[in-house]
Amino acid sequence: TETKSHIVAEIQEWKKKRNAILLAHNYELPEIQDIADVLGDSLALARAAAETTADVIVFCGVHFMAETAAMLNPEKTVLLPDLEAGCSLADSITADQLREWKAEHPGAVVVAYVNTTAEVKALSDYCCTSSNAVDIVRSIPEDQEILFLPDMFLGSFVQRETGRENMHIWMGECHVHAGIAPEHVDDVLTQHPEAELLVHPECGCSTSSMYLMSEGILPKNKTHILSTGNMLKHSKTSEASEFIVATEVGIIHQMQKQNPEKRFIPANRTAVCPFMKMITLEKVLAALKENKHVITVPEETAEKAKLAIERMISIG
Ligand code: 13P
Ligand code: SF4
Protein backbone atom coordinates (compact mmCIF):
# COMPACT_ATOMS: atom_id res chain seq x y z
CA THR A 1 0.00 0.00 0.00
CA GLU A 2 0.93 3.65 -0.32
CA THR A 3 1.62 4.19 3.37
CA LYS A 4 3.82 1.09 3.47
CA SER A 5 5.93 2.21 0.53
CA HIS A 6 6.18 5.61 2.17
CA ILE A 7 7.53 4.05 5.37
CA VAL A 8 9.94 1.89 3.36
CA ALA A 9 11.27 4.98 1.57
CA GLU A 10 11.76 6.74 4.90
CA ILE A 11 13.56 3.69 6.32
CA GLN A 12 15.93 3.73 3.33
CA GLU A 13 16.69 7.42 3.90
CA TRP A 14 17.37 6.92 7.59
CA LYS A 15 19.53 3.89 6.86
CA LYS A 16 21.77 6.05 4.69
CA LYS A 17 21.80 8.91 7.15
CA ARG A 18 22.92 6.64 9.98
CA ASN A 19 25.08 4.21 7.97
CA ALA A 20 22.86 1.42 9.23
CA ILE A 21 22.41 -2.19 8.16
CA LEU A 22 19.19 -4.15 8.55
CA LEU A 23 19.60 -7.79 9.57
CA ALA A 24 16.46 -9.96 9.54
CA HIS A 25 15.69 -13.54 10.52
CA ASN A 26 13.83 -15.88 8.16
CA TYR A 27 10.77 -15.83 10.49
CA GLU A 28 10.20 -12.09 10.25
CA LEU A 29 7.07 -10.59 8.65
CA PRO A 30 7.15 -10.56 4.80
CA GLU A 31 7.51 -6.76 4.64
CA ILE A 32 10.55 -6.93 6.92
CA GLN A 33 12.10 -9.78 4.91
CA ASP A 34 11.64 -7.70 1.77
CA ILE A 35 13.69 -4.74 3.04
CA ALA A 36 16.47 -6.68 4.81
CA ASP A 37 20.10 -6.13 3.79
CA VAL A 38 20.86 -9.58 5.11
CA LEU A 39 18.16 -12.19 5.62
CA GLY A 40 19.24 -15.44 7.17
CA ASP A 41 19.36 -18.06 9.88
CA SER A 42 20.91 -17.41 13.30
CA LEU A 43 24.43 -18.32 12.18
CA ALA A 44 24.37 -16.23 8.99
CA LEU A 45 23.07 -13.23 10.93
CA ALA A 46 25.71 -13.55 13.66
CA ARG A 47 28.37 -13.77 10.94
CA ALA A 48 26.93 -10.72 9.16
CA ALA A 49 26.93 -8.81 12.47
CA ALA A 50 30.58 -9.75 13.03
CA GLU A 51 31.63 -8.58 9.56
CA THR A 52 29.65 -5.41 8.93
CA THR A 53 31.27 -2.01 8.54
CA ALA A 54 27.99 -0.20 9.30
CA ASP A 55 27.77 2.03 12.40
CA VAL A 56 24.29 0.89 13.35
CA ILE A 57 22.83 -2.63 13.24
CA VAL A 58 19.04 -2.80 13.29
CA PHE A 59 18.23 -6.32 14.39
CA CYS A 60 14.92 -7.57 13.05
CA GLY A 61 14.80 -10.69 15.13
CA VAL A 62 14.65 -11.41 18.84
CA HIS A 63 16.51 -10.18 21.91
CA PHE A 64 19.23 -12.86 22.18
CA MET A 65 20.20 -12.23 18.55
CA ALA A 66 20.65 -8.51 19.15
CA GLU A 67 22.61 -9.30 22.32
CA THR A 68 24.95 -11.59 20.39
CA ALA A 69 25.48 -8.85 17.78
CA ALA A 70 26.19 -6.35 20.56
CA MET A 71 28.79 -8.65 22.14
CA LEU A 72 30.52 -9.05 18.78
CA ASN A 73 30.46 -5.27 18.20
CA PRO A 74 30.82 -3.35 21.46
CA GLU A 75 31.75 -0.21 19.51
CA LYS A 76 28.64 -0.29 17.30
CA THR A 77 25.05 0.64 18.04
CA VAL A 78 22.76 -2.39 18.01
CA LEU A 79 19.03 -1.63 17.92
CA LEU A 80 16.12 -3.97 18.60
CA PRO A 81 12.91 -2.31 17.36
CA ASP A 82 10.76 -3.91 20.10
CA LEU A 83 12.18 -4.86 23.50
CA GLU A 84 9.35 -7.34 24.04
CA ALA A 85 10.70 -9.54 21.23
CA GLY A 86 12.02 -12.34 23.46
CA CYS A 87 12.25 -16.10 23.03
CA SER A 88 10.52 -18.84 25.02
CA LEU A 89 13.47 -21.18 24.41
CA ALA A 90 16.04 -18.68 25.73
CA ASP A 91 13.79 -18.29 28.79
CA SER A 92 13.89 -22.02 29.50
CA ILE A 93 17.23 -21.85 31.33
CA THR A 94 18.56 -19.14 33.65
CA ALA A 95 22.17 -18.47 34.61
CA ASP A 96 21.47 -19.77 38.14
CA GLN A 97 20.02 -23.01 36.81
CA LEU A 98 23.09 -23.46 34.62
CA ARG A 99 25.44 -22.80 37.57
CA GLU A 100 23.67 -25.55 39.53
CA TRP A 101 23.77 -27.96 36.59
CA LYS A 102 27.49 -27.34 36.11
CA ALA A 103 28.11 -27.97 39.81
CA GLU A 104 26.47 -31.39 39.41
CA HIS A 105 28.86 -32.21 36.53
CA PRO A 106 32.23 -30.70 37.36
CA GLY A 107 34.59 -30.72 34.38
CA ALA A 108 31.84 -31.04 31.75
CA VAL A 109 32.03 -28.85 28.64
CA VAL A 110 28.98 -26.62 28.15
CA VAL A 111 27.50 -26.28 24.65
CA ALA A 112 24.79 -23.62 24.54
CA TYR A 113 22.44 -23.04 21.64
CA VAL A 114 22.59 -19.41 20.50
CA ASN A 115 18.99 -19.08 21.76
CA THR A 116 20.18 -18.20 25.28
CA THR A 117 20.75 -15.03 27.29
CA ALA A 118 24.18 -13.36 27.40
CA GLU A 119 24.55 -14.48 31.06
CA VAL A 120 24.05 -18.11 30.05
CA LYS A 121 26.53 -17.74 27.18
CA ALA A 122 29.04 -16.30 29.65
CA LEU A 123 28.89 -19.60 31.57
CA SER A 124 29.32 -21.69 28.41
CA ASP A 125 32.33 -23.03 26.51
CA TYR A 126 30.75 -23.24 23.06
CA CYS A 127 27.74 -21.67 21.43
CA CYS A 128 26.12 -23.30 18.43
CA THR A 129 23.17 -22.81 16.11
CA SER A 130 20.99 -25.42 14.45
CA SER A 131 23.23 -25.32 11.38
CA ASN A 132 26.50 -26.18 13.15
CA ALA A 133 25.47 -27.96 16.39
CA VAL A 134 26.56 -31.36 15.05
CA ASP A 135 29.95 -30.04 13.86
CA ILE A 136 30.55 -28.28 17.18
CA VAL A 137 29.84 -31.40 19.23
CA ARG A 138 32.03 -33.47 16.88
CA SER A 139 34.88 -31.00 17.44
CA ILE A 140 34.91 -31.79 21.18
CA PRO A 141 37.12 -34.75 22.25
CA GLU A 142 35.07 -37.93 22.54
CA ASP A 143 35.87 -38.67 26.17
CA GLN A 144 34.75 -35.21 27.24
CA GLU A 145 31.41 -35.05 29.07
CA ILE A 146 29.05 -32.46 27.54
CA LEU A 147 26.15 -30.42 28.90
CA PHE A 148 23.94 -29.41 25.97
CA LEU A 149 21.30 -26.71 26.43
CA PRO A 150 18.55 -25.59 26.36
CA ASP A 151 16.64 -27.38 23.57
CA MET A 152 15.79 -31.04 24.12
CA PHE A 153 14.75 -31.73 20.52
CA LEU A 154 17.89 -30.21 19.02
CA GLY A 155 19.88 -32.02 21.73
CA SER A 156 18.45 -35.41 20.89
CA PHE A 157 18.98 -34.75 17.16
CA VAL A 158 22.66 -33.95 17.82
CA GLN A 159 23.00 -36.99 20.04
CA ARG A 160 21.54 -39.26 17.37
CA GLU A 161 23.75 -37.78 14.65
CA THR A 162 26.96 -37.99 16.68
CA GLY A 163 26.20 -41.17 18.63
CA ARG A 164 27.49 -39.38 21.69
CA GLU A 165 26.49 -40.99 24.97
CA ASN A 166 28.31 -38.72 27.44
CA MET A 167 26.05 -35.79 26.57
CA HIS A 168 23.43 -34.50 29.02
CA ILE A 169 20.54 -32.55 27.54
CA TRP A 170 18.56 -29.76 29.22
CA MET A 171 14.80 -30.26 28.93
CA GLY A 172 13.92 -26.88 27.41
CA GLU A 173 11.85 -26.21 24.31
CA CYS A 174 10.63 -23.51 21.96
CA HIS A 175 6.85 -23.45 22.33
CA VAL A 176 6.38 -22.76 18.62
CA HIS A 177 8.49 -25.67 17.38
CA ALA A 178 7.45 -28.06 20.15
CA GLY A 179 3.91 -27.51 18.85
CA ILE A 180 4.78 -29.11 15.51
CA ALA A 181 4.01 -32.69 16.49
CA PRO A 182 4.48 -36.05 14.73
CA GLU A 183 0.72 -36.27 14.07
CA HIS A 184 0.76 -32.95 12.18
CA VAL A 185 3.48 -34.27 9.89
CA ASP A 186 1.59 -37.56 9.48
CA ASP A 187 -1.59 -35.79 8.42
CA VAL A 188 0.08 -33.51 5.89
CA LEU A 189 2.18 -36.37 4.49
CA THR A 190 -0.97 -38.40 3.92
CA GLN A 191 -2.42 -35.51 1.91
CA HIS A 192 0.84 -34.90 0.00
CA PRO A 193 2.62 -38.26 -0.28
CA GLU A 194 4.99 -37.03 -3.01
CA ALA A 195 6.29 -34.03 -1.07
CA GLU A 196 9.74 -33.73 0.47
CA LEU A 197 9.75 -33.18 4.23
CA LEU A 198 11.89 -30.35 5.68
CA VAL A 199 12.13 -30.42 9.47
CA HIS A 200 13.79 -27.95 11.84
CA PRO A 201 15.63 -29.86 14.60
CA GLU A 202 13.83 -27.80 17.30
CA CYS A 203 10.49 -29.36 16.28
CA GLY A 204 8.48 -31.70 18.44
CA CYS A 205 8.44 -34.00 15.39
CA SER A 206 12.21 -34.07 14.78
CA THR A 207 12.98 -37.07 17.00
CA SER A 208 10.19 -39.15 15.49
CA SER A 209 11.21 -38.11 11.96
CA MET A 210 14.74 -39.37 12.60
CA TYR A 211 13.38 -42.59 14.01
CA LEU A 212 11.03 -43.11 11.05
CA MET A 213 13.92 -42.44 8.68
CA SER A 214 16.14 -44.98 10.41
CA GLU A 215 13.30 -47.55 10.18
CA GLY A 216 12.89 -46.85 6.47
CA ILE A 217 9.32 -45.56 6.96
CA LEU A 218 10.25 -42.04 5.86
CA PRO A 219 12.46 -42.10 2.75
CA LYS A 220 15.97 -40.80 3.55
CA ASN A 221 16.30 -38.92 0.25
CA LYS A 222 13.04 -37.07 0.87
CA THR A 223 13.43 -36.19 4.56
CA HIS A 224 15.82 -33.46 5.65
CA ILE A 225 16.49 -32.05 9.12
CA LEU A 226 17.86 -28.55 8.56
CA SER A 227 18.34 -25.03 9.93
CA THR A 228 16.16 -22.36 8.32
CA GLY A 229 19.04 -21.16 6.12
CA ASN A 230 19.74 -24.68 4.90
CA MET A 231 16.01 -25.27 4.26
CA LEU A 232 16.09 -22.29 1.91
CA LYS A 233 19.20 -23.57 0.15
CA HIS A 234 17.72 -27.04 -0.18
CA SER A 235 14.37 -25.89 -1.53
CA LYS A 236 16.22 -24.03 -4.31
CA THR A 237 18.41 -26.91 -5.42
CA SER A 238 16.01 -29.83 -4.91
CA GLU A 239 14.14 -31.14 -7.93
CA ALA A 240 10.99 -31.81 -5.92
CA SER A 241 7.98 -29.63 -6.65
CA GLU A 242 6.25 -29.93 -3.26
CA PHE A 243 7.66 -29.50 0.24
CA ILE A 244 6.19 -29.94 3.69
CA VAL A 245 7.76 -27.34 5.93
CA ALA A 246 8.06 -28.16 9.64
CA THR A 247 9.19 -24.89 11.20
CA GLU A 248 7.85 -21.40 11.89
CA VAL A 249 5.66 -20.48 8.93
CA GLY A 250 7.31 -17.09 8.25
CA ILE A 251 9.99 -18.82 6.19
CA ILE A 252 7.44 -19.83 3.56
CA HIS A 253 7.30 -16.24 2.25
CA GLN A 254 10.98 -16.49 1.26
CA MET A 255 10.69 -20.05 -0.08
CA GLN A 256 7.79 -19.05 -2.28
CA LYS A 257 9.54 -15.88 -3.42
CA GLN A 258 12.68 -17.76 -4.44
CA ASN A 259 10.78 -20.67 -6.01
CA PRO A 260 7.48 -19.39 -7.44
CA GLU A 261 6.86 -22.63 -9.35
CA LYS A 262 7.19 -24.90 -6.29
CA ARG A 263 4.63 -25.54 -3.56
CA PHE A 264 5.35 -25.17 0.17
CA ILE A 265 2.92 -26.59 2.70
CA PRO A 266 3.25 -25.83 6.42
CA ALA A 267 3.28 -28.93 8.66
CA ASN A 268 1.31 -26.88 11.18
CA ARG A 269 -0.05 -23.55 10.00
CA THR A 270 -0.44 -22.30 13.57
CA ALA A 271 3.34 -22.44 14.15
CA VAL A 272 3.77 -18.68 14.39
CA CYS A 273 6.40 -17.07 16.64
CA PRO A 274 4.70 -14.10 18.31
CA PHE A 275 8.08 -12.55 19.15
CA MET A 276 9.38 -12.50 15.58
CA LYS A 277 6.13 -10.88 14.40
CA MET A 278 6.51 -7.97 16.82
CA ILE A 279 8.97 -6.25 14.47
CA THR A 280 6.99 -4.05 12.07
CA LEU A 281 7.99 -1.44 9.47
CA GLU A 282 6.73 1.32 11.78
CA LYS A 283 8.92 0.07 14.62
CA VAL A 284 11.99 -0.24 12.36
CA LEU A 285 11.54 3.38 11.29
CA ALA A 286 11.08 4.54 14.88
CA ALA A 287 14.18 2.54 15.89
CA LEU A 288 16.33 4.39 13.34
CA LYS A 289 14.85 7.81 14.03
CA GLU A 290 14.81 7.64 17.81
CA ASN A 291 17.82 5.35 18.32
CA LYS A 292 15.87 2.68 20.17
CA HIS A 293 16.15 0.23 21.76
CA VAL A 294 19.90 0.17 22.23
CA ILE A 295 21.02 -3.32 23.28
CA THR A 296 24.15 -3.49 25.40
CA VAL A 297 25.76 -6.26 27.41
CA PRO A 298 27.92 -5.55 30.48
CA GLU A 299 31.59 -5.78 29.49
CA GLU A 300 32.38 -8.50 32.00
CA THR A 301 29.59 -10.75 30.70
CA ALA A 302 30.50 -10.07 27.05
CA GLU A 303 34.16 -10.82 27.74
CA LYS A 304 33.25 -14.20 29.24
CA ALA A 305 30.80 -15.08 26.45
CA LYS A 306 33.07 -14.05 23.62
CA LEU A 307 35.15 -17.21 23.24
CA ALA A 308 31.99 -19.37 23.06
CA ILE A 309 30.46 -17.07 20.43
CA GLU A 310 33.65 -16.90 18.39
CA ARG A 311 33.85 -20.69 18.33
CA MET A 312 30.28 -20.76 17.00
CA ILE A 313 31.12 -18.29 14.23
CA SER A 314 34.23 -20.14 13.12
CA ILE A 315 33.03 -23.77 13.15
CA GLY A 316 30.78 -25.29 10.44
P1 13P B 1 17.81 -20.98 12.70
O1 13P B 1 17.29 -19.89 11.82
O2 13P B 1 19.25 -20.78 13.03
O3 13P B 1 17.54 -22.32 12.10
O4 13P B 1 17.05 -20.87 14.10
C1 13P B 1 15.70 -21.05 14.28
C2 13P B 1 15.12 -20.28 15.41
O5 13P B 1 14.19 -20.69 16.05
C3 13P B 1 15.65 -18.98 15.71
O6 13P B 1 14.99 -18.45 16.76
FE1 SF4 C 1 12.46 -18.44 20.18
FE2 SF4 C 1 10.97 -20.32 19.10
FE3 SF4 C 1 10.51 -17.82 18.45
FE4 SF4 C 1 12.74 -19.02 17.57
S1 SF4 C 1 10.64 -19.54 17.03
S2 SF4 C 1 12.58 -16.99 18.50
S3 SF4 C 1 13.18 -20.38 19.27
S4 SF4 C 1 10.27 -18.72 20.49
Image (cartoon, rainbow, N blue to C red):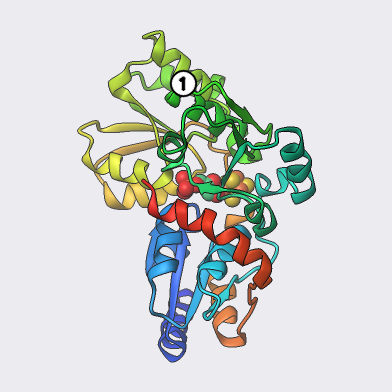
Dot 1 crowding, Cα within 10 Å, few <14, some 14–19, many 20+: few
Tell me: residue 138, above or below residue 9. Answer: above
Give the structural element (helix, strand or loop) at label 1.
loop
Residue 297 visible in this rendered orientation of the protein: no
Q: Quadrant of residue 233?
A: top left
Q: Is residue 234 left or right of residue 112?
A: left
Where in the figure is residue 162, as x and y percent of width and height?
Answer: 44, 26
Q: Is residue 200 above or below residue 61?
A: above
- In this rendering, position of residue 287 left or right of residue 247: right
Residue in the picture at 58% in, 37% down: 177
Image spot of residue 143 (x, y percent)? 51, 27
Front residue (pair 259, 296): 296
Q: Looking at this view, is 111 or 151 the one in front?
A: 111
Residue 281 in view (yes/no):
yes
Is 263 on the left or on the right of 99, as rendered? left
Under 8 Å from ligand 1: the CB of mark 1? Answer: no
Occupied quadrant, residue 68? bottom right
Horizontal and vertical percent position of residue 128: 50, 46
In the rendered image, which residue does mark 1 sit on?
Answer: 163
Instruction: Give the image location of residue 271, x and y in percent.
Output: 57, 40
**Type of the residue with mark 1:** Gly
Residue visible at 49% across and 52% down in the picture: 27
Q: Quadrant of residue 299?
A: bottom right
Above-or-below relation of 231 to 290: above
Indicate the quadrant containing the N terminus: top left, top right, bottom left or bottom right: bottom left
- Give the residue displayed 55% in from the left and 61% down from the top: 306
Number of numbered discs on residues: 1
Looking at the image, is 301 positioned above or below residue 124?
below
Indicate left or right for 107 with 39 as reference: right
